[in-house]
Amino acid sequence: MGDTRIRDIFMGWPGGFWVIDPDTGFKVEAGNYKVLKAKWLSHRQSNNLPVTLVESWIHEQMCARDPGGYCTDGTVPQATIPQMIKNALVAGAKYVASGGAMATPDVVAKRTEICNGCEYWDRYALGGTGRCKVCGCSKIKLHMPLESCPKNKW
């Protein structure tokens, strides 16, 4: 099994979540990752089959059908939740200190263009609105004139 993982288990998946049990051939389907995992564990337990690799199998099977952007191989850094909280608090403090200043429409457009073409921008995150994998920011940061890209792209 590879290191490829579902990028965001809380995000929807085109066609829904489903896997084929490698031992029984049974198709397990669900509307989300958590329910899929529970149903597959139940299926394996009721058939007296080992359950130790279920999570890896889910990621492997789902990522084999990745329509693009739903899985990651782990080579791109991912901002941690504590990092994202810290970054948001610092950005918010700078925004308040600036008196609520907003970047000009031209600056926002240029930043948006750069982020949309960046290898670190995850366009599927946050319900399809996008998020930077390095700092965890959303497109809100693009509107804050005192903010900058953690990779110095803008």
Image (cartoon, helix red, strand yellow):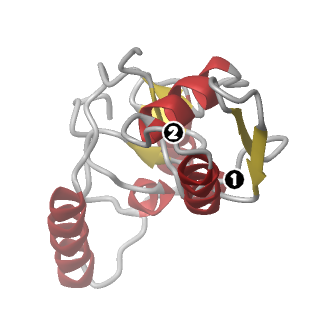
Q: Residue 32, relative to residue 55: is it above or below? A: below
Give the residue at mark 2: 49
Q: Residues within 10 Å of mark 2 (few under 14, many from 20)?
A: few
Q: List x then y, in percent, for residue 114.
A: 48, 30
132 over 118 or under it: above or below:
below
Percent position (x, y) of residue 93? Answer: 17, 79
Residue 105: x and y, percent?
Answer: 57, 54
Quarter assignment of residue 91: bottom left
Q: Secondary structure at mark 2?
A: loop
Observer-side mark, 1 or 2, equals 2
**Residue 129, how many percent across, how many down?**
61, 54
Residue at 19 percent across and 74 percent down: it is: 89
Residue hosting label 1: 12
Residue 16 seen by the camera: yes
Amino acid tagged 1: Gly
The quadrant the N terminus occupies is top left
- How far apart are the alpha carbons under marks 1 and 2? 28 Å
Label 1: which secondary element = loop
